[in-house]
Image (tube, helix red, strand yellow):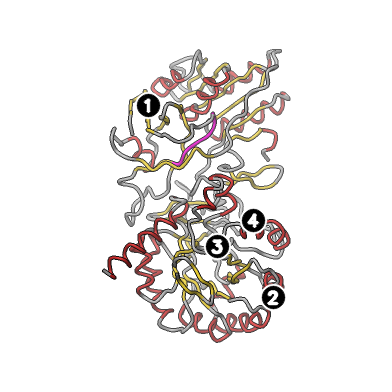
Amino acid sequence: MTAFCGIELAHPVINASGCFDALAAREVFGDSLIERFPFAAYVSKTVTLGPRAGNPPPRLWEAAGGLINSIGLPNPGIDAYLETHLPAYAALGVPIITNVMGSTVEQFGELVERVALRDEVAAIELNVSCPNVATGLDIGADPHELERLVTALRPLSAKPLIVKLTPNAADVAACAAAAESGGADSVSLINTLRAMALAPGATAPWLGGGTGGLSGPAIRSIALAQVASVAASVAIPVIGMGGVASGADAAALLDVGATLVAVGTETFRDPAAGRRIANELAQRFAENAA
Amino acid sequence: MVGRRALGAYVVLEVGDEAVAAAPGQFYMLAAVVGWGGGEGERPFLGRAISALFAGDGRVGFLLEDVGPGTGRLCSLAVGEELWLVGPLGRGFDAPPAEREALLVGGGVGIPPLAMFQEAWGGRALLGFRDARHAAGASLLKDAELATDDGSVGHAGYVTDLLERELRAAGEVCVYACGPPAMLETVRALTLAAGVPAWLALEAPMACGFGACFGCVVATHDGFKRVCLDGPVFEAAVLA
């Protein structure tokens, strides 16, 4: 068992927000998904106050050793999330972490207050770092703004607050320390790195959103450096992620101070990646103990 | 991989698959086990969404053309090498209405869903290819009427010219199409103008193939829809 902010988890591997979609996966793979849910907790995609359609396509570009996406946080809005998505997630049988994003402190406040009322939610993750959305970049990249936000949200919920940090900041460790000062229970990192691709044979950006976020093995070494830096700077638990595709990758993040490891892009290639990585990790622990 | 043969400009792969067989219009995500992804700095990284060409008796087949790093790697596989398969995925074609003749309009490497359709429910095939080398793919369907861009086989011009002729004739038809985006757009416009029901099997780059990434969306009159989960087959009238 792994303890995280007072939550008991079966193992230290969870999903990264925005990648694995439990509802779509259940629709495609059936109830066997529930019986063998690949993650120790389920982190929702980002939820906003109102519904969002997302960015115009094309939304994907396969980069060297990774993927640039400009999905644009499509979601049904908080009303539909609480009414239909959350009860469906609760049936997964693992703790649920709801990820929310507002464009102002007031919007964040309303989202946190509404999510806090629901017993199905084990923790709340604040998306202050999505590089696809201008507001996220501003708050999460500025330690003062970030501390102000977390300080304002802290009294609104007794549930653990996780701040998802952006890697697109001058000093990520300073942002982590600011989140901790504001009262965050945990920080998670890294989100995608702002990136761009040009359309083949053209001078214009390929992605409908202009720029996007880079993920996958290409960012694994950057994630390791940032997680190590943040874990050395704060006392609260750290959720490490970025390019994790194997038990060895997960172990590296735990070795530099992460408490949990999240898997994102790899679940696109292998929907069962969470379970595979958790098993590989358990095997490493067993070998080390022997 | 249990079988591989060259077919003109194409390669037909056969993979052992004991799982549920694909229905016409469904697809799989394909990736080679070795020489694919993970290795830093190398494409391909993501699986490639490839329609099933046939499925049954523990085997599923795919039609491939070497057009880039992913399909190039898949075409280079030899019998005995391993693939990652996730599938069958997506919503394929429904059985055609009994009162209408099914016209199967295909272009290039997009013909596999129509081959499975014809095998299951029949239908008259109109197929378009770049040249004679690619037109060898027409042997995957029965009694196809052909068009080639260079005029080397069949009608000199587009397969949509053949469709236009059929739509001018008086018969009660419905259209099932798969091929390059420009061809599908013409099929959509022609069938809509003629008031003929049509279903299009779309293609889009996908990161996952099972509805998680929201990267493959297409604009419809009801907002963005995921090609992988809501499609790949869409009724032409719903596309915006």
Residue A76 in the image: x percent, y percent?
68, 57
Mark 2 and mark 4 in contact? Answer it, CB < 8 Å: no
Which circle's residue, 2 or 4, is located before the other in the chain? Answer: 4
Q: Which mark is residue A88?
A: 4
Mark 4 is surrounded, within 10 Å at the Cα level, by few (under 14), some (14 to 19) or many (20 or more) other residues, namely: some
Residue A173 in the image: x percent, y percent?
45, 80
Which circle's residue, 3 or 2, is located before the other in the chain? Answer: 3
What is the CA distance from the residue labelled 1 to the residue labelled 2?
A: 59 Å
Determine which residue is flagged by label 1: B9
Label 1: which secondary element: loop
Residue A133 in the image: x percent, y percent?
60, 65
Nearer the camera: disc 1 or disc 2? 2
Q: Which residues are magenta?
A: B24-29
Determine which residue is flagged by label 3: A94
What is the CA distance from the residue labelled 3 to the residue labelled 1?
A: 50 Å
Tell me the subunit letter for badge 2: A
Nearer the camera: disc 4 or disc 1? 4
What is the CA distance from the residue labelled 3 to the residue labelled 4?
A: 12 Å
Relative to B210, does residue B51 appear above or below in the rendering? above
Kind of residue at disc 2: Gly
What is the CA distance from the residue labelled 3 to the residue labelled 2?
A: 26 Å
